Structure formats: structure tokens, C-alpha cells
Image (spheres, grey):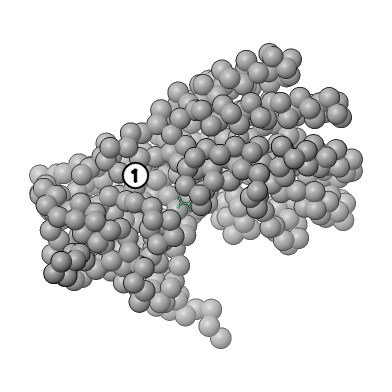
Amino acid sequence: MLHQPNLTVNAAGHLALGGVDTVALAEKYGTPLYVLDEDMIRSRMGLYKTAMTACLPAGSRPLYASKAMCCKALCRAAMEEGMGLDTVSAGELYTALAAGFPPSGICCHGNAKTDEELRYAIQSRVGCIVADGEQELARIDRLCGQMGLRQSVLLRVTPGIDPHTFAAVNTGVVDVKFGVPVPTGQALAVTGAALKMPHIDLEGFHCHIGSQIFDAGPFRLEVDVMLSFLDSVRRAYGYTAGVLNLGGGFAVPYEPGESAPDCGGMIRQVGEHLAALCRQYDYPAPAVMMEPGRGIVAAAGITLYTVQNVKTVPGGSTYAAVDGGMGDNPRYALYRARHSAVLASRAGEPEDCAVTIAGRCCESGDLIGENVPLHMPQAGDILAVLVTGAYTYSMASNYNRVPRPPVVALRGGQDRLIVRRETLQDVAALDL
Ligand code: LLP
């Protein structure tokens, strides 16, 4: 069932994304194919920008979490829509810089950055590095000293909040690989150490509590913990933070029945709550950064496959084997994450069966989904898996030496290739 407003069925009975016939796209570019509705991506970027500018303290800004989907075209879109960028590796930083993204708008993350990555970020004059702990702060300080440069940093802390999303993306609890815990007192101690380091400027703090958050409640709790923490830091060291980065995590509906969260309303509630706490603590309102990734790109994307074979096991499942799979979308194999799907070539037909969509890899766990409601597929059908704009291309692999699919962006009804298809030569290009 189509549950995204940008998906329609056209007069030919084909699935259309942003008004563009997806079967025609499959014919033009081949399958598997990632398709992104760039108009939707830009309007989502605008929504976060407008809401954060209107509802949060001066200087507040959304940063696009490029781990969700990183390529030069999306970095350019983020730049043109006035967003900052959250990068998480030298590879993402390189992509952003190569796209012409201003380094001052880039915030570099990672819980295990190498010296080489840190040097690259510092040398590139990135706006901010999020340090994961005391050892990394000391390394940034030492590298800056060697390079004769200063660097703005945020310290990543874990507020000890469980937003009750799925475990793989639950990152704000205390016993987790990211950041320094607030509840144990370690974050306060590390802040004291950071403030003594001569080559870094501690601008404030970063925290991220998880993904797929549907309402403002967990973010309000995060603000509670962080304002109380900022107040204890001020009492201990007389230091006032100018920046509070609350991370990403805005949910998107993946299946019919899940409703889209009101992100603008969530940001307004966060802003009101923060303002109240700043009054309560008599704390100067910090600029707030938020890092939506999925909330910007997920619903804008679909993946098109060609059904290769269909079989029904008596008393068992109906399998539709497609020309892609965990190599281009590992989310079901990794998290049992559910995506809905539709036959793009016969999109007007009713859902009359539950199908296991099987990938092409030699691995029985290579599935895109089980018991997915669909019209009975036939070999040759174009199958569209929905809401695949986030964490699919960015997590893709060459398992079984399958080339990765290209990415096509749709803007104003026009399609353009933004990432080309890998060739067999690409797949073996690094072999010596
Ligand atoms: N900021 C930080 C520090 C993060 O760790 C993340 C996501 C984000 C922002 C963006 O979160 P979002 O707005 O996209 O929820 N591969 C998983 C998701 C992993 C999320 C990791 N961190 C998936 O396919 O669902």
C-alpha cells in the first residue's frame, strides 16, 4: 500500500515517484536502481531549517547527518538549502569538501577517529570536531599544537536516556561505545580536563540518544539532563557552553499505519522546553544543533528491482527473488527492519499475497523482507521497495562481487544520474 504522498499510480498503472514513471526509470537506467525525490529532500531540509531558526536560540542550525546517504549531490543540496553537515569519517569529509561544502559548516564525528583523520579535519579547517572522550581531546590538542592551529570542539556525552527505539540505534544510554557518561560524573571531569587544553576551544557539548524517535518526549528528557549538566559545569568551572548539539533521530514511517511525526512541532516543543530550563537555571540560551539524517532522505527514496524468479513452497512461503538484496539494502538482514513494497509495473493491482523478497546473494539471510503484502509477482515485474532513501546506499557492499546500483535524483519532474552504476571493472579495480 502506498503511504507516502509523493508516490502515486499513473494512467499506465505504473508507480510514479514525484510524478515520474518508475518503470520508465528502470528501463532507462536498469535495475537495481536507487531513486531519490530531490524536491522532497530539499523541502525536508527547508522544514528543519525553518523550524530550528524560528523555535530555537540564535545561531541554531540543522546539520544533515550524511551517514544516512552521502554523495556529492546531496552535500550540494544541503549546502544550497543552508544546512550544516555532520560527517563521520574522512571519506564523508572528503566527499563534502569535493562537493564544495564550506568546511566551517562541517562537524566531524566518530568514536574511533585516527590521527590521520583528525589531522585531515583540522587541516581542512572544519567548523567543529566532536571529541568522543578525554583521550581523543588530548590527541586533538596535541595535533593542533604540532600543526600550529586551534580547533573548535564539542565533547560528546551520553545523557543516560533510553528513547525506547530498537537496540541497534539506541545510543544515549550510559553503557554504550559513544561518548562520556553524564550520570557517572565522568563527563564533568573530562570537561575540566578539556578546559585546560591549550590548543582547543571547547564550544559546548554533543549528545545523540537514538533513532526513529516519533515524539518530542525523549528530546525533552535529553534537554533536562543536558541543562542540569551545563549548570553543574558552570558551577564547577565557571564555564558557559555556547553550543548544545542534540543529535539526530527524527523518525519516519516505514509501513502503512505508522504516521509521520510532526518534526516542526517536535522542534517547537524542544525550543519551548529549552527556553523554560534556561530561565530556571538562569543560563544563557546556547545555540542548538540537531542532526537529522533519516528524517531528510528516507521517505524520499525507493529502490527498483527486477523480479527474476518466483516460487511458492507448498505449505511455506512465496519467494520473489530480485536482482539486488542485502548488498544494496542490508537493513532487514541486520535489524529485521521492515520496508513495504509495491509492484511498480502493476501498481494499481490489489495486494493479494504475502511475499518474501529474496536477494541475490548466496546467503539464506539475504532478504529484503518477509511476508510483505504485494500483488502476486511474476518474473520480469519491476518491484519497488519503499522508504529506502536512508541507510541503504550508504551501507551498501560488494558482497559476492555484485556491483553497487546507481542513484538517480528527480527534480522538477526531471531525472538525472547522481551516482553511476559500478561496473565489473570497478569491482576488481583494487585487486593487484
Ligand atoms: N547524529 C549522530 C551522532 C548519529 O549517530 C546519527 C545516527 C545521526 C545523527 C542521524 O540519526 P537519524 O536522524 O538518521 O536517525 N543504520 C541504521 C541507523 C543508524 C543510525 C546511526 N546514527 C538504520 O539503518 O536504521
* Left/right of residue 342 with respect to residue 396 in the rendered view: left
Where residue 85 appears, as percent x and y from the top left, is 58, 43
Which amino acid type is shown beneath numbered disc 1?
Tyr
* Residue at disc 1, secondary structure: loop
* Left/right of residue 238 with respect to residue 432 in the rendered view: right
* Left/right of residue 295 with respect to residue 101 in the rendered view: left
Count of numbered tags:
1
Q: Mark 1 points at which residue?
A: 254
Structural crowding at the residue carrying mark 1, measured as other residues with C-alpha within 10 Å and reported as few (<14), some (14–19) or many (≥20): many
Above or below for 418 versus 129: below
Q: Which residue is drawn at 75% across and 48% down?
A: 133
Quadrant assignment, res 256: top left
Above or below for 128 versus 225: below
Q: Which residue is drawn at 39% across and 71% down?
A: 403
| Residue 26 visible, this angle | no
Q: Residue at x 15, y 61 (%)?
A: 377
Q: Which residue reaches farthest front?
A: 315
The C terminus lies in quadrant: bottom right
Q: Residue at x 20, y 44 (%)?
A: 1
Where residue 84 appears, as percent x and y from the top left, is 58, 39
* Left/right of residue 88 with respect to residue 339 in the rendered view: right
Above or below for 314 versus 52: below
Where residue 232 appears, as percent x and y from the top left, is 79, 27
Q: Is mark 1 within 8 Å of ligand 1?
A: no
Above or below for 276 versus 45: above
Where residue 346 appears, as percent x and y from the top left, is 12, 53
Q: Nearer the viewer, residue 229 or 350?
A: 229
| Residue 116 visible, this angle | yes
